[in-house]
Amino acid sequence: MTSTQQDHIVLLVDTPFFENLPAWVTDNFTVTTGGYHDGQPSRNKLVIFEDGSYLEFFNWYDTPPSLDKENLPMRFWGPKPPGLIDFAITDTTHSAEESVGAVNECLSEGPEKDAGLGVQFGKPIAGSHKKADGVEIKWKVTRPEFSQGAKTPGAELFTNGRIDVPFFCHDVTPRTNRVPYKDEKKMTHPCGTVGIATCEILVPKHLHAEYARIYSKILGSSIQSATGQNSHTLDIGVPEGPVRSTVVVRAAETEHDVKRMQERGVGFSDLVIAIKPNGPGGEVRCQLGSTGIESTIWLETSKGE
């Protein structure tokens, strides 16, 4: 058990998608109005889960800020194409400053330090936005800062910028203001989802062990036995309830995996959303679609009674 928890998933979408959500979204999820971010031309809509985490549909409605705007941590998403691009973790038992200090200390330990991947975390940066009802929400974001380590993959595997590990998001105002997961209507969904089951991280095969090690340091979680020849699972908590979530670090072995990694970069590749079982039976996993963004999102029904 660790104090680190899933916070939210970032799904970058274009303006037509944002303003007219496709059927695969509206048929499966209850979508909650988000708000407009202060200081940059972006807005969001949320899918809030029973476990206190959420899926964020993030949209640039105008030109994204330049990468030199250091007070805007979301600027790193500017060059990215639509799709799953990032995810946030949190630690509700420590402040943003305490968390980044502890993680950086862990990343500095051992002979290989950060597994040779050139990862440390910067200082927390304040963020805010106003909801449609005028309520202001404040948080702090701590993003990874990358350097060229001894085992850092080549630039050709960081298409449109490097985002191969998650960032931290800490609430300043009450978390229920940012994530109203106590509202039963907002967290009840047609597909029966209750939360995030798994975030899959696609990495180069020859660096599989290094990425599993650095995720272990960041999440504060031990590396569990391989679920297959090419993957390792790490445990992570959720903000609400006894259910746990996982992060799976998976080596790119198939032609499809390698192509995807070359096109989108090393990092977050697939999201698995947990569904309540309706009855007896084994685990079932299915894609929300065969093409597009929806092909990277899976619904997984856990084993029933």
Image (tube, grey):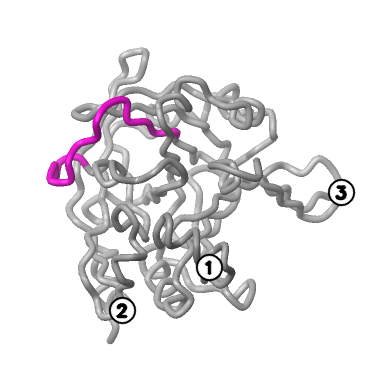
- Secondary element at image label 3: loop
The residue pinned by badge 2 equals: 151
Q: CA distance from mark 1 to mark 3?
A: 30 Å
Judge whether residue 219 can be spotted in this image: yes
Residue 198: percent from the left, percent from the top?
A: 56, 54
Q: As drawn, which residue projects farthest toward the right?
A: 280
Q: Residue flagged by tag 2: what amino acid is it?
A: Lys
Residue ID at (46%, 46%): 84
* Prevailing SS of the magenta stretch: loop
Q: Amino acid at mark 1?
A: Arg
Residue 225 visible in the current orientation: no
Would you place residue 219 above or below residue 17 in this image? Answer: below
Q: Kindly identify which residue carries mark 1.
A: 250
Give percent across and percent down for residue 192: 69, 35
Residue 174 picture location, percent across and down: 35, 32
State which tag comes first along the sequence, 1 or 3. 1
Amino acid type at circle 3 is Pro
> In this rendering, would 264 be left or right of 303?
left
Q: Which residue is mark 3?
A: 280
Q: Residue at x 59, y 30 (%)?
A: 25
- Foreground: 30 or 182? 30
Q: Neighbour class for label 3 at 10 Å: few (<14), some, many (≥20)?
A: few
Q: Give the camera-side residue of 105 and 268.
A: 268
Q: Start and end of the magenta stretch?
A: 57-72
